[in-house]
Image: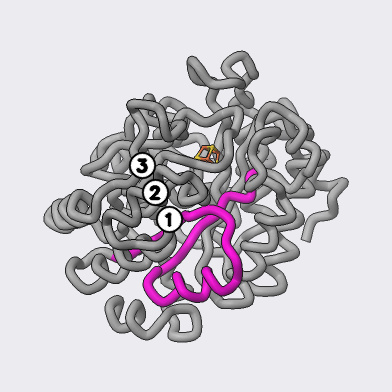
Amino acid sequence: MLSKEEMISMLKVHGNDVLDLMKQANSLRKTNKITFSKNVFLPLTNICRNDCGYCTFRRDPEDPDATLIMPPSDVMNTIRKADVYGCREALFTFGEQADTSPQVQDALEKFGFEGMLEYLYHLCERTLNETSLLPHSNPGILQKSELKMLKEVNASMGLMLENSSPRLMNMPAHEKSPGKDPKLRIKTIENAGKLKIPFTTGLLIGIGESLEERTNSLLELRRIQDKYDHIQEIIIQNFKPKPGIKMEKHPEPSLLDMIRMVAVTRILFPECGVQVPPNLNINTAPIFLLSGADDWGGVSPLTKDYVNPESPWPELDELERFTQEIGLQLEERLPVYQKYVKDEFLSEAIFRKIA
Ligand code: SF4
Protein backbone atom coordinates (compact mmCIF):
# COMPACT_ATOMS: atom_id res chain seq x y z
CA MET A 1 0.00 0.00 0.00
CA LEU A 2 1.34 3.42 -0.93
CA SER A 3 0.78 6.52 1.14
CA LYS A 4 -0.73 9.58 -0.45
CA GLU A 5 2.58 11.43 -0.12
CA GLU A 6 4.50 8.60 -1.80
CA MET A 7 2.01 8.57 -4.67
CA ILE A 8 2.21 12.32 -5.19
CA SER A 9 5.99 12.22 -5.25
CA MET A 10 5.85 9.32 -7.78
CA LEU A 11 3.54 11.42 -9.96
CA LYS A 12 6.19 14.16 -9.94
CA VAL A 13 9.31 12.15 -10.79
CA HIS A 14 11.43 13.17 -13.74
CA GLY A 15 14.68 12.21 -15.49
CA ASN A 16 15.97 8.73 -14.81
CA ASP A 17 13.53 8.37 -11.92
CA VAL A 18 10.77 8.01 -14.52
CA LEU A 19 12.57 4.95 -15.90
CA ASP A 20 12.90 3.53 -12.37
CA LEU A 21 9.19 4.07 -11.78
CA MET A 22 8.32 2.32 -15.05
CA LYS A 23 10.61 -0.56 -14.13
CA GLN A 24 9.04 -0.90 -10.70
CA ALA A 25 5.54 -0.94 -12.21
CA ASN A 26 6.51 -3.30 -14.98
CA SER A 27 8.09 -5.76 -12.54
CA LEU A 28 4.62 -6.33 -11.07
CA ARG A 29 3.42 -7.85 -14.32
CA LYS A 30 2.43 -11.45 -13.58
CA THR A 31 2.46 -12.76 -17.15
CA ASN A 32 3.64 -11.60 -20.55
CA LYS A 33 0.04 -11.53 -21.79
CA ILE A 34 -1.62 -8.30 -22.89
CA THR A 35 -5.36 -8.79 -23.15
CA PHE A 36 -8.12 -7.29 -25.25
CA SER A 37 -11.79 -8.00 -25.76
CA LYS A 38 -13.20 -8.29 -29.27
CA ASN A 39 -16.31 -6.17 -29.03
CA VAL A 40 -19.08 -4.42 -30.88
CA PHE A 41 -20.01 -0.88 -29.82
CA LEU A 42 -23.75 -0.23 -29.44
CA PRO A 43 -24.50 3.46 -28.81
CA LEU A 44 -28.22 3.03 -28.00
CA THR A 45 -28.80 6.79 -27.80
CA ASN A 46 -26.62 9.89 -27.89
CA ILE A 47 -29.07 11.89 -25.80
CA CYS A 48 -27.66 12.51 -22.32
CA ARG A 49 -28.83 14.49 -19.31
CA ASN A 50 -25.19 15.56 -18.75
CA ASP A 51 -23.16 17.95 -20.87
CA CYS A 52 -19.47 17.33 -20.17
CA GLY A 53 -16.95 19.88 -21.38
CA TYR A 54 -14.97 17.21 -23.25
CA CYS A 55 -17.81 15.33 -24.95
CA THR A 56 -18.32 15.00 -28.70
CA PHE A 57 -20.84 12.16 -28.42
CA ARG A 58 -23.82 13.89 -26.84
CA ARG A 59 -26.56 15.54 -28.92
CA ASP A 60 -29.64 17.59 -28.06
CA PRO A 61 -32.89 15.80 -28.96
CA GLU A 62 -33.67 18.52 -31.56
CA ASP A 63 -30.31 18.02 -33.34
CA PRO A 64 -30.74 16.41 -36.78
CA ASP A 65 -27.69 14.20 -35.92
CA ALA A 66 -29.32 12.91 -32.73
CA THR A 67 -30.02 9.19 -32.37
CA LEU A 68 -33.04 9.23 -30.07
CA ILE A 69 -33.09 5.44 -29.89
CA MET A 70 -31.30 2.83 -31.97
CA PRO A 71 -34.17 0.54 -33.08
CA PRO A 72 -34.07 -3.02 -31.71
CA SER A 73 -33.79 -4.50 -35.21
CA ASP A 74 -30.68 -2.37 -35.93
CA VAL A 75 -29.11 -3.34 -32.60
CA MET A 76 -29.73 -7.05 -33.09
CA ASN A 77 -28.57 -6.99 -36.73
CA THR A 78 -25.31 -5.33 -35.65
CA ILE A 79 -24.80 -7.90 -32.88
CA ARG A 80 -25.49 -10.80 -35.28
CA LYS A 81 -22.94 -9.37 -37.69
CA ALA A 82 -20.45 -9.05 -34.82
CA ASP A 83 -21.09 -12.69 -33.99
CA VAL A 84 -19.98 -13.62 -37.50
CA TYR A 85 -16.80 -11.54 -36.95
CA GLY A 86 -16.10 -13.56 -33.78
CA CYS A 87 -16.81 -10.71 -31.31
CA ARG A 88 -17.59 -11.83 -27.77
CA GLU A 89 -18.55 -8.55 -26.09
CA ALA A 90 -21.68 -6.51 -26.81
CA LEU A 91 -20.75 -3.11 -25.39
CA PHE A 92 -23.87 -1.06 -24.61
CA THR A 93 -22.68 2.50 -24.03
CA PHE A 94 -25.00 5.48 -24.21
CA GLY A 95 -26.01 8.81 -22.69
CA GLU A 96 -27.12 8.86 -19.06
CA GLN A 97 -30.85 8.94 -18.17
CA ALA A 98 -31.76 9.75 -21.77
CA ASP A 99 -35.35 8.83 -21.05
CA THR A 100 -35.78 12.02 -19.00
CA SER A 101 -36.13 13.61 -22.47
CA PRO A 102 -39.76 13.40 -23.70
CA GLN A 103 -38.57 12.73 -27.27
CA VAL A 104 -36.59 9.66 -26.13
CA GLN A 105 -39.48 8.53 -23.95
CA ASP A 106 -41.83 8.74 -26.98
CA ALA A 107 -39.38 6.81 -29.16
CA LEU A 108 -39.05 4.10 -26.49
CA GLU A 109 -42.82 3.83 -26.13
CA LYS A 110 -43.15 3.33 -29.88
CA PHE A 111 -40.95 0.26 -29.53
CA GLY A 112 -43.00 -0.93 -26.55
CA PHE A 113 -40.66 0.05 -23.68
CA GLU A 114 -41.33 2.23 -20.67
CA GLY A 115 -37.75 3.33 -20.07
CA MET A 116 -34.13 3.04 -21.12
CA LEU A 117 -33.20 0.35 -18.62
CA GLU A 118 -36.12 -1.84 -19.60
CA TYR A 119 -34.96 -1.53 -23.22
CA LEU A 120 -31.38 -2.30 -22.23
CA TYR A 121 -32.45 -5.40 -20.29
CA HIS A 122 -34.44 -6.63 -23.28
CA LEU A 123 -31.46 -6.21 -25.63
CA CYS A 124 -29.03 -7.86 -23.22
CA GLU A 125 -31.40 -10.80 -22.79
CA ARG A 126 -31.77 -11.20 -26.55
CA THR A 127 -27.99 -10.97 -26.98
CA LEU A 128 -27.58 -13.82 -24.50
CA ASN A 129 -30.33 -15.94 -26.00
CA GLU A 130 -29.73 -15.37 -29.70
CA THR A 131 -25.96 -14.84 -30.15
CA SER A 132 -22.56 -15.92 -28.80
CA LEU A 133 -21.83 -12.49 -27.33
CA LEU A 134 -21.84 -11.45 -23.67
CA PRO A 135 -23.28 -8.05 -22.70
CA HIS A 136 -21.21 -5.39 -20.92
CA SER A 137 -23.25 -2.25 -20.14
CA ASN A 138 -22.22 1.29 -19.21
CA PRO A 139 -25.53 3.04 -18.53
CA GLY A 140 -24.22 5.75 -16.15
CA ILE A 141 -25.12 6.10 -12.48
CA LEU A 142 -27.68 3.58 -11.27
CA GLN A 143 -29.65 2.69 -8.16
CA LYS A 144 -28.78 -0.56 -6.40
CA SER A 145 -32.05 -2.19 -7.56
CA GLU A 146 -31.23 -1.26 -11.19
CA LEU A 147 -27.75 -2.75 -10.91
CA LYS A 148 -29.24 -5.90 -9.43
CA MET A 149 -31.65 -6.25 -12.35
CA LEU A 150 -28.91 -5.68 -14.96
CA LYS A 151 -26.54 -8.15 -13.29
CA GLU A 152 -28.90 -10.91 -14.42
CA VAL A 153 -28.03 -10.24 -18.07
CA ASN A 154 -24.53 -8.68 -17.98
CA ALA A 155 -21.17 -10.42 -17.71
CA SER A 156 -19.68 -7.22 -16.30
CA MET A 157 -20.56 -3.56 -16.09
CA GLY A 158 -18.71 -0.27 -16.07
CA LEU A 159 -18.72 3.32 -14.90
CA MET A 160 -15.76 5.67 -15.07
CA LEU A 161 -15.19 7.43 -11.77
CA GLU A 162 -13.47 10.18 -13.87
CA ASN A 163 -12.20 11.84 -10.70
CA SER A 164 -13.30 11.87 -7.07
CA SER A 165 -12.94 15.63 -6.66
CA PRO A 166 -16.21 17.60 -6.24
CA ARG A 167 -14.22 20.70 -7.35
CA LEU A 168 -14.55 19.58 -10.99
CA MET A 169 -18.32 20.07 -10.69
CA ASN A 170 -17.59 23.81 -10.81
CA MET A 171 -15.22 23.58 -13.77
CA PRO A 172 -15.87 23.33 -17.54
CA ALA A 173 -15.42 19.54 -17.42
CA HIS A 174 -18.46 18.80 -15.26
CA GLU A 175 -20.28 22.03 -14.43
CA LYS A 176 -23.28 20.94 -16.53
CA SER A 177 -23.20 17.28 -15.61
CA PRO A 178 -25.15 16.35 -12.48
CA GLY A 179 -24.36 12.69 -13.13
CA LYS A 180 -20.62 13.37 -12.75
CA ASP A 181 -21.06 14.15 -9.05
CA PRO A 182 -18.36 11.89 -7.59
CA LYS A 183 -20.57 11.01 -4.61
CA LEU A 184 -23.16 9.45 -6.94
CA ARG A 185 -20.52 7.63 -8.97
CA ILE A 186 -18.78 6.25 -5.90
CA LYS A 187 -22.14 5.04 -4.61
CA THR A 188 -22.83 3.22 -7.89
CA ILE A 189 -19.39 1.57 -7.87
CA GLU A 190 -19.83 0.56 -4.22
CA ASN A 191 -23.32 -0.82 -4.84
CA ALA A 192 -21.94 -2.87 -7.72
CA GLY A 193 -19.41 -4.21 -5.20
CA LYS A 194 -22.13 -5.12 -2.70
CA LEU A 195 -23.89 -7.00 -5.51
CA LYS A 196 -20.66 -8.67 -6.67
CA ILE A 197 -20.76 -7.34 -10.21
CA PRO A 198 -17.40 -7.58 -12.00
CA PHE A 199 -16.69 -3.93 -12.67
CA THR A 200 -14.62 -1.71 -14.93
CA THR A 201 -13.91 1.83 -13.84
CA GLY A 202 -11.23 4.42 -14.39
CA LEU A 203 -10.04 7.99 -14.38
CA LEU A 204 -10.03 10.67 -17.03
CA ILE A 205 -6.69 12.43 -16.89
CA GLY A 206 -6.14 16.09 -17.73
CA ILE A 207 -9.59 17.62 -17.19
CA GLY A 208 -8.43 20.25 -14.72
CA GLU A 209 -7.60 18.02 -11.75
CA SER A 210 -4.49 18.39 -9.59
CA LEU A 211 -1.95 15.64 -8.84
CA GLU A 212 -3.43 15.41 -5.37
CA GLU A 213 -6.90 14.88 -6.84
CA ARG A 214 -5.57 12.12 -9.13
CA THR A 215 -4.03 10.48 -6.06
CA ASN A 216 -7.23 10.84 -4.00
CA SER A 217 -9.21 9.26 -6.85
CA LEU A 218 -6.93 6.22 -7.00
CA LEU A 219 -7.01 5.89 -3.22
CA GLU A 220 -10.81 6.05 -3.27
CA LEU A 221 -10.91 3.19 -5.77
CA ARG A 222 -8.41 1.28 -3.61
CA ARG A 223 -10.67 1.76 -0.57
CA ILE A 224 -13.66 0.38 -2.51
CA GLN A 225 -11.65 -2.52 -3.92
CA ASP A 226 -10.36 -3.47 -0.46
CA LYS A 227 -13.96 -3.70 0.71
CA TYR A 228 -15.60 -5.50 -2.23
CA ASP A 229 -12.86 -6.88 -4.53
CA HIS A 230 -15.01 -6.51 -7.65
CA ILE A 231 -12.94 -4.06 -9.73
CA GLN A 232 -11.56 -6.10 -12.60
CA GLU A 233 -9.83 -3.26 -14.45
CA ILE A 234 -8.97 0.40 -14.21
CA ILE A 235 -8.87 2.56 -17.32
CA ILE A 236 -6.43 5.44 -17.38
CA GLN A 237 -7.79 7.60 -20.18
CA ASN A 238 -6.16 10.75 -21.42
CA PHE A 239 -8.26 13.84 -22.19
CA LYS A 240 -8.01 14.83 -25.86
CA PRO A 241 -8.97 18.32 -27.02
CA LYS A 242 -11.24 18.14 -30.04
CA PRO A 243 -12.62 20.87 -32.29
CA GLY A 244 -16.01 22.16 -31.18
CA ILE A 245 -15.96 20.96 -27.56
CA LYS A 246 -16.10 23.41 -24.65
CA MET A 247 -12.60 22.35 -23.59
CA GLU A 248 -11.16 22.68 -27.08
CA LYS A 249 -8.32 24.92 -25.85
CA HIS A 250 -7.61 22.95 -22.67
CA PRO A 251 -4.16 21.29 -22.80
CA GLU A 252 -3.96 17.50 -22.94
CA PRO A 253 -1.89 15.64 -20.35
CA SER A 254 1.72 15.11 -21.36
CA LEU A 255 3.04 11.67 -22.26
CA LEU A 256 5.10 11.72 -19.05
CA ASP A 257 2.00 12.54 -16.99
CA MET A 258 0.29 9.51 -18.48
CA ILE A 259 3.29 7.22 -18.00
CA ARG A 260 3.57 8.20 -14.32
CA MET A 261 -0.18 7.79 -13.81
CA VAL A 262 -0.27 4.33 -15.42
CA ALA A 263 2.74 3.22 -13.40
CA VAL A 264 1.31 4.42 -10.07
CA THR A 265 -2.02 2.74 -10.88
CA ARG A 266 -0.25 -0.57 -11.54
CA ILE A 267 1.72 -0.30 -8.29
CA LEU A 268 -1.41 0.51 -6.26
CA PHE A 269 -3.53 -2.16 -8.00
CA PRO A 270 -1.26 -5.15 -8.67
CA GLU A 271 -4.30 -7.46 -8.87
CA CYS A 272 -6.35 -5.47 -11.44
CA GLY A 273 -6.14 -5.01 -15.17
CA VAL A 274 -4.76 -1.59 -16.10
CA GLN A 275 -6.00 -0.34 -19.43
CA VAL A 276 -4.95 2.54 -21.67
CA PRO A 277 -7.17 3.03 -24.73
CA PRO A 278 -4.89 2.38 -27.72
CA ASN A 279 -6.94 4.44 -30.16
CA LEU A 280 -6.32 7.60 -28.11
CA ASN A 281 -2.58 6.89 -28.04
CA ILE A 282 -1.90 5.42 -31.40
CA ASN A 283 1.77 6.48 -31.58
CA THR A 284 2.62 6.01 -27.93
CA ALA A 285 0.54 3.02 -26.82
CA PRO A 286 3.45 0.53 -26.46
CA ILE A 287 5.20 2.75 -23.92
CA PHE A 288 2.29 2.19 -21.52
CA LEU A 289 2.87 -1.55 -21.65
CA LEU A 290 6.35 -0.80 -20.32
CA SER A 291 4.75 1.25 -17.54
CA GLY A 292 2.57 -1.56 -16.20
CA ALA A 293 -0.54 -1.51 -18.42
CA ASP A 294 -1.71 -4.97 -19.39
CA ASP A 295 -4.95 -4.54 -21.28
CA TRP A 296 -6.04 -2.77 -24.47
CA GLY A 297 -9.74 -2.87 -23.59
CA GLY A 298 -12.44 -3.46 -26.13
CA VAL A 299 -11.28 -3.49 -29.72
CA SER A 300 -13.87 -3.71 -32.45
CA PRO A 301 -13.30 -5.18 -35.87
CA LEU A 302 -16.75 -3.90 -36.84
CA THR A 303 -17.82 -0.60 -35.27
CA LYS A 304 -15.99 2.66 -34.61
CA ASP A 305 -15.47 4.21 -31.17
CA TYR A 306 -18.55 6.45 -31.22
CA VAL A 307 -17.30 8.40 -28.20
CA ASN A 308 -14.01 9.23 -29.96
CA PRO A 309 -14.93 8.92 -33.64
CA GLU A 310 -11.84 10.87 -34.76
CA SER A 311 -9.59 8.15 -33.24
CA PRO A 312 -10.08 4.90 -35.14
CA TRP A 313 -9.19 1.66 -33.42
CA PRO A 314 -5.95 0.10 -34.56
CA GLU A 315 -6.44 -3.08 -36.56
CA LEU A 316 -5.96 -6.24 -34.52
CA ASP A 317 -2.80 -7.22 -36.37
CA GLU A 318 -1.37 -3.77 -35.67
CA LEU A 319 -2.10 -4.23 -31.95
CA GLU A 320 -0.47 -7.62 -32.12
CA ARG A 321 2.58 -6.16 -33.86
CA PHE A 322 3.29 -3.47 -31.30
CA THR A 323 2.55 -5.83 -28.40
CA GLN A 324 5.01 -8.40 -29.75
CA GLU A 325 7.54 -5.71 -30.62
CA ILE A 326 8.22 -5.22 -26.92
CA GLY A 327 8.27 -8.91 -26.15
CA LEU A 328 4.70 -9.37 -24.93
CA GLN A 329 1.87 -11.46 -26.26
CA LEU A 330 -1.62 -10.40 -27.29
CA GLU A 331 -4.42 -12.54 -25.89
CA GLU A 332 -8.17 -12.25 -26.29
CA ARG A 333 -10.27 -12.19 -23.13
CA LEU A 334 -13.99 -12.10 -22.37
CA PRO A 335 -15.69 -8.92 -21.08
CA VAL A 336 -15.49 -10.55 -17.65
CA TYR A 337 -11.97 -11.29 -16.42
CA GLN A 338 -11.19 -14.94 -15.71
CA LYS A 339 -10.77 -14.23 -11.99
CA TYR A 340 -14.47 -13.35 -11.81
CA VAL A 341 -15.83 -16.33 -13.72
CA LYS A 342 -17.39 -17.76 -10.55
CA ASP A 343 -21.00 -18.28 -9.70
CA GLU A 344 -20.93 -15.69 -6.88
CA PHE A 345 -20.01 -12.96 -9.39
CA LEU A 346 -22.25 -14.01 -12.27
CA SER A 347 -25.94 -14.72 -12.73
CA GLU A 348 -26.85 -18.28 -13.54
CA ALA A 349 -27.63 -17.39 -17.17
CA ILE A 350 -24.23 -15.74 -17.71
CA PHE A 351 -22.31 -18.43 -15.85
CA ARG A 352 -24.02 -21.16 -17.89
CA LYS A 353 -23.30 -19.34 -21.11
CA ILE A 354 -19.59 -18.92 -20.35
CA ALA A 355 -19.34 -22.56 -19.28
S1 SF4 B 1 -19.22 12.26 -21.69
FE1 SF4 B 1 -20.84 10.76 -21.31
S2 SF4 B 1 -21.91 11.60 -19.53
FE2 SF4 B 1 -20.74 13.29 -20.42
S3 SF4 B 1 -22.14 14.31 -21.83
FE3 SF4 B 1 -20.96 12.81 -23.01
S4 SF4 B 1 -22.27 11.02 -23.03
FE4 SF4 B 1 -22.99 12.31 -21.38
Point 40% across, 69% down: residue: 155
Residue, disc 3: 68
Q: Quote the CA–CA distance across marks 2 and 1.
A: 5 Å
Is 29 in front, or is 159?
159
Determine if residue 130 is in view. Answer: yes
Crowding at label 3, few (<14), some or many (≥20) Cα neighbours within 10 Å?
many
Q: Which mark is residue 32?
A: 1
Magenta residue check for 136? yes
Mark 2 residue type: Leu
Q: Quote the CA–CA distance across marks 1 and 3.
A: 43 Å
Q: Position of residue 192 (x, y in %)?
A: 58, 69
Q: Position of residue 303 (x, y in %)?
A: 26, 41
Q: In the rendered structure, are the residues bearing label 1 and label 3 in contact, judged by CB atoms less than 8 Å apart?
A: no
Magenta stretch: give its range.
134-162
Point 27% across, 78% down: residue: 353
Q: Quote the CA–CA distance across marks 3 and 2.
A: 42 Å
Residue, disc 2: 328
| Quadrant hosting residue 116 | bottom left
Q: Secondary structure at mark 3?
A: loop
Mark 1 residue type: Asn
Crowding at label 2, few (<14), some or many (≥20) Cα neighbours within 10 Å?
some
Q: Secondary structure at mark 1?
A: loop
Determine if residue 318 is in view. Answer: no
Magenta residue check for 84? no
